[in-house]
Amino acid sequence: MREKDFALLLDAAHQQLRGNTAPVWDNYSHHIDAAMREPIAKRPGLTVFRFPTYSPDPNPAEGERAHLKNSLGNHAPCIDDLAGPVRTRPKRMQYRPDLLDGIIAQTKLIMTPP
């Protein structure tokens, strides 16, 4: 995704959530460059929180990736056999709220505002 894509994603999320939006981003170059700072500043009700430079513990994406890698580890004896599972596993995870809740719980982030 590029800056334009992130801006469209933020707009869509804000529109769907109908309220203040607070994404938590890592330090991926497209998240922190000048091309993103300006669009973020222009959006009322949008506050971006950034993770420290390297912080796998509070990042839910790390848990998701770890689960995905573990689920694929013994799946196929040949790299060519992994194409299908690599495409379908993330979609299957989407329909397992218990798994996703567990991944988020491991981050020890507070999910409800004070």
Image (cartoon, rainbow, N blue to C red):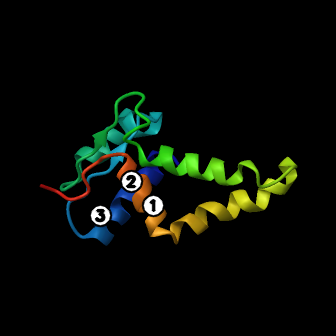
Q: Provide the residue designation for mark 2.
A: 104
Separation of residues labelled 2 and 1 (CA atoms): 6 Å
How far across and how far down the image is residue 110, in percent?
Answer: 24, 51
- Report which residue position mark 1 lands on: 100
Labels 2 and 1 touching (C-beta < 8 A): yes
Picture disc at residue 90 = none
Residue type highlighted by circle 1: Leu
Residue 39, horizontal then vertical, whole percent:
31, 47
- Assign the C terminus to one quadrant of the image: bottom left
Q: Secondary structure at mark 3?
A: helix
Q: Residues within 10 Å of mark 2 (few under 14, many from 20)?
A: many
Residue flagged by tag 2: what amino acid is it? Ile
Among the two numbered marks 3 and 2 on one chain, the one whose residue lies closer to the N terminus:
3
Q: Nearer the viewer, residue 91 or 67?
A: 67
Residue carrying label 3: 14
Q: Looking at the picture, which amino acid does disc 3 mark?
A: His
User: Would you call the spot at circle 3 few (<14 residues within 10 Å), some (14-19), or many (20 or more)?
Assistant: some
- Work out how far the residue at label 3 is from the one at label 1, CA to CA, in angstroms: 22 Å
Q: Is residue 30 above or below residue 21?
A: above
The local crowd at label 1, few if under 14, some if 14 to 19, many if 20 or more residues have their Cα within 10 Å, is some
Residue at 40%, 38% in the rendered image: 57
**Residue at 35% across, 64% down:** 13
Q: Residue 8, can we see it? A: no
Residue 35's x, y, as percent?
38, 38
